[in-house]
Image: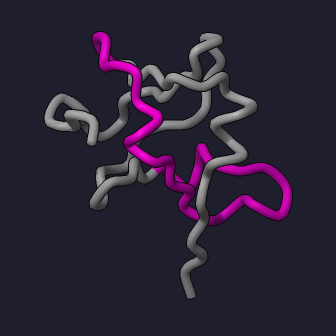
Amino acid sequence: MADTSNIREHMEVIGADGVHVGTVDGIEGDRIKLTKADSGQGSHEGHHHYISTGLIAGVEGDQVRLSANADVAVTFEEEESEG
C-alpha cells in the first residue's frame, strides 16, 4: 500500500500524463476520496469518487501523482452515491 501520510485535503490528483483527475476530500482505507464538486461528469456528478491508493506514484508539493494516465485512472474510479 502506498504511503498516504503526506496526502491532505484539497490536494490536486493528477494522472501520469499531467491531466487533472480530481481534488482530494480525504483518505478512506486504501482509497483516495475525491470531492463531489470535482469528480465526475454527467450522470456521475454529485457522487464522491474514489481512486485506489495503489495507483499513487508519488506526492509532490500539493499534488498527488498517479502511475496511470488520467483517462485510465478514471476507469478505475469507484463511486458511492449518497442518499
Q: Residue at x 60, y 11 (%)?
A: 18
User: What x and y, as percent, mark residue 38?
Assistant: 59, 43
* In the image, farthest residue toward the right: 42
- Pick the quarter of the image with the N terminus: top left
Quarter of the image holding residue 62? top left
Tell me if 53 is positioned left or right of 4 in this view.
right
Q: Residue at x 45, y 27 (%)?
A: 12
Quarter of the image holding residue 48? bottom right
The answer to whether residue 5 is above or below residue 36 is above
Tell me if 64 is positioned left or right of 59 in this view.
right
Q: Is residue 55 magenta?
A: yes
* In the image, farthest residue toward the left: 5
Q: Residue at x 31, y 50 (%)?
A: 26
Total marks in image: 0
User: What x and y, as percent, mark residue 34?
Assistant: 48, 48
The residue range painted magenta reads 34-62
User: What x and y, as percent, mark residue 14?
Assistant: 54, 23
Tell me if 3 is positioned left or right of 78 in this view.
left
Q: Residue at x 34, y 19 (%)?
A: 58
Q: Is residue 25 magenta?
A: no
- Pick the quarter of the image with the C terminus: bottom right
Tell me if 55 is positioned left or right of 40 in this view.
left
The answer to whether residue 29 is above or below residue 58 is below
Colouring of the image: one colour
The answer to whether residue 48 is above or below residue 1 is below
